[in-house]
Image (tube, rainbow, N blue to C red):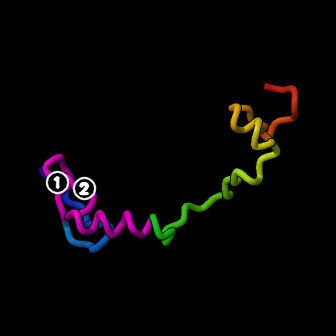
Amino acid sequence: MVLKVKCPQCGRETEYSEKNPYRPFCCARCRWIDLGSWANEEYVIPGKPMEADDDLDISAEDLAKGKYHDKSRPSGTS
């Protein structure tokens, strides 16, 4: 028995197997449309936003050397 799913982009029923290189999408077009939606930030994963680099409590020089400071841990702990 072949597993059939609805394409998340257009809703067309499509085969979910190795025979379909675009799975879970029905075609390359739907896959590209979905990727574009992610790139345009039309989709959002709920949760706490990540810190941006400018939120880090570290100098640019230390950051370039590979050092970092994690604000979630008190200093001196590993």
- Residue at (33, 70) in percent of width and height: 33
Above or below, 45 against 74 in this view is below
Residue 20: numbered disc = 1
Callout 2 secondary element:
loop
User: How far from the left and from the top, in percent, is residue 40?
Assistant: 47, 70
Task: Quadrant for residue 72, please give it.
Answer: top right
Q: Which residues are magenta?
A: 14-38
Looking at the picture, tell me which residue is in the foreground, 77 or 61. 61
Report whether 46 appears left or right of 21. Answer: right
- Residue at (68, 32) in percent of width and height: 66
Q: Residue at label 2?
A: 23
Looking at the picture, tell me which residue is in the foreground, 26 or 55. 55
Callout 1 secondary element:
loop
**Magenta-span inclusion, residue 8:** no
Task: Tell me the distance, in whole angstroms, between the alpha carbons under discs 1 and 2.
Answer: 6 Å
Report whether 52 appears left or right of 20. Answer: right
Quarter the C terminus occupies: top right
Task: Tell me the kind of residue under disc 2.
Answer: Arg
User: How far from the left and from the top, in percent, is residue 4?
Assistant: 19, 59
Task: Tell me the kind of residue under disc 1.
Answer: Asn
Specify few, some or many for label 1: CA neighbours under 10 Å numbering under 14, 14-19, or 20 or more: few
Above or below, 19 against 68 in this view is below
